[in-house]
Amino acid sequence: MSLYWDVYHETMSREQLADIQLKRLKSLVQRVYTSVPFYRQAFQEKGISPGDINSLDDLKNLPFTTKKDLRDTYPFGLFAVPRSEIVRMHASSGTTGKPIVVGYTKRDLETWSDLVARCITVAGGTKEDVVQNAYGYGLFTGGLGIHYGAERLGATIVPISGGNTARQIMLMQDFGTTILTCTPSYALYLAEEIHAAGVDLKNLRLKAGIFGAEPWSDNMRIQLEEKLGISAHDIYGLSEVLGPGVGVECSCKNGLHIFEDHFIPEIIDPKTEQPVPYGQKGELVFTTLTKEGFPVIRYRTRDISALHPEKCACGRTHLRMERITGRTDDMLIIRGVNVFPSQIESVLLEFGETEPHYLLVVDRKAGMDDLEIQVELSQKMFSDKVAALEVLERRLRQRILSVLGISARIRLVEPKSLPRSEGKAKRVIDKREL
Ligand code: DLL
């Protein structure tokens, strides 16, 4: 089994990597300055011209790009090539108003496929694998992004897209699927349905899952690995920067390797906008080094993570990013305390008496924030005595209080009663008028 897809770039020394990055950064800055009026103006406002970028450290002098900038230039304002050079577009849904539109040149699609092939290899895949791709196909980057990467690797791709769970399970058995790709919440639903259908894991050939597009916790990983008998890997990406393929976990599961030959990641303090040291949490910011159609300079993702530079036991030299714990805009502020849904998920899963299906309902009652955590009981607990449920409820409440510092009401609900998702799960209902 080949451990690396591109051994040269994946294991080069940090000095060599920095050389490549600087060369690519200089060319990127020149390119966007010449061809994207938005960037030229933003640079001029800061008094910067392409000649001022002489070291990687100079990156911090460049302006940020935000989601608002993407909206204001909708649909094609940030494309760096004529529209006729764009061979594919994707768009991220966005909850309000117009979507974010991104465009790819022919070469961008090749780079993307190559990076996704790299991701699948990092997660242990080879051309011998059968990849069942249950990410949604369409404007969402998940489906087509994984699809062409798996083809590039030479694996057998099953382009089933999301949903149609019974058929997923049938094909998984009949085609001998070895790698499942979908959101972690859909993987969990699939796992439950596999068990409910009485399918013996021994009759499946699944060995790995490549799950992403939404936050999930290490405790969720344990559940998925157990329920599906696989090794579960976190994959990260966002439409504005590429789609899936910006980074992925290797077998060490010690953070996601960010492919630094193509992207420069930074962590900033979202308030002061200043870079923070390695190891410290903050907002993830990306500069794309090789994208032609839709390059971005210092794009503020709103995702929260930290970066670690130490070389990984897998031999890769690229930085590792901690699992995303949430987004600056998903962060709930409840009675003044910052809370991320994934922290609550982690606590709920410590117990093993509830299922990893939960919903957070936030409301304001008599001027006070109120958090209700609805969580499904495991089948075994469900048939238990009321007294046992009361004890569980109390233990969960206490644990949430000690870990997060807030009190919450716990509502234990029947197994399978909360809505399931085929794509990104909705975990929070915020009824407060903020
Ligand atoms: O979700 C791309 C993707 C597809 C990634 C398939 C992985 C697998 P968007 O729809 O633009 O793109 O959403 C991007 O999703 O800013 C994060 O908030 C979140 N996200 C993506 N991957 C992860 C992950 C795709 N592994 C937004 N962990 C990002 C946590 C993730 N959040």
Image (cartoon, grey):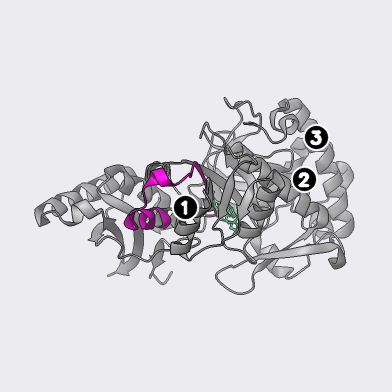
Residue 310 pos. (x, y %): 60, 26
Q: Earlier in the sequence, mark 3 or mark 1?
A: 3
* Residue neighbourhood size for the residue with mark 1, other residues' Cα within 10 Å, grouped as few (<14), some (14–19), many (≥20): some
Q: Assess whether residue 347 is covered by the magenta stretch.
A: no
From the viewer's perspective, is residue 165 above or below residue 321? below
Q: Does residue 50 appear left or right of residue 63 in this picture?
A: right
- Label 2, on which residue? 289
Choose between 240 and 155: the one closer to the eye.
155
Residue at the far front: name it: 174
Q: What separation in Å lies between label 3 and label 1 (alpha carbons)?
A: 45 Å
* Image location of residue 317, percent across then percent down: 66, 29
Q: Give the residue type that dot 1 points to.
A: Gln
Residue 291 at what x, y percent from top left?
78, 51
The magenta stretch spans residue 211: yes
| Front-lying residue, 48 or 69 | 69
Q: Quadrant of residue 60?
A: top right
Specify the quadrant that holds the N terminus. Answer: top right
> Which quarter of the image is occupied by the C terminus?
bottom left
Q: CA distance from mark 3 to mark 2?
A: 9 Å
- The stretch in magenta equals 190-213
Which is nearer the eye, 355 or 158?
158
Tell me how far mark 1 sits from mark 2, CA to CA. Answer: 41 Å
Of residues 150 and 342, the one drawn nearer to the viewer in this rendering? 150
- Badge 1 element: helix
312, above or below 178, in the image: above
Q: Which mark is residue 173?
A: 1
Which residue in the protein does label 3 denote?
20
In the image, what residue type sits under mark 2? Answer: Leu
Q: Give the amino acid at mark 3.
A: Ile
What is the residue that sits farthest to the bottom in this orientation? 97
Q: Is residue 167 visible?
A: yes
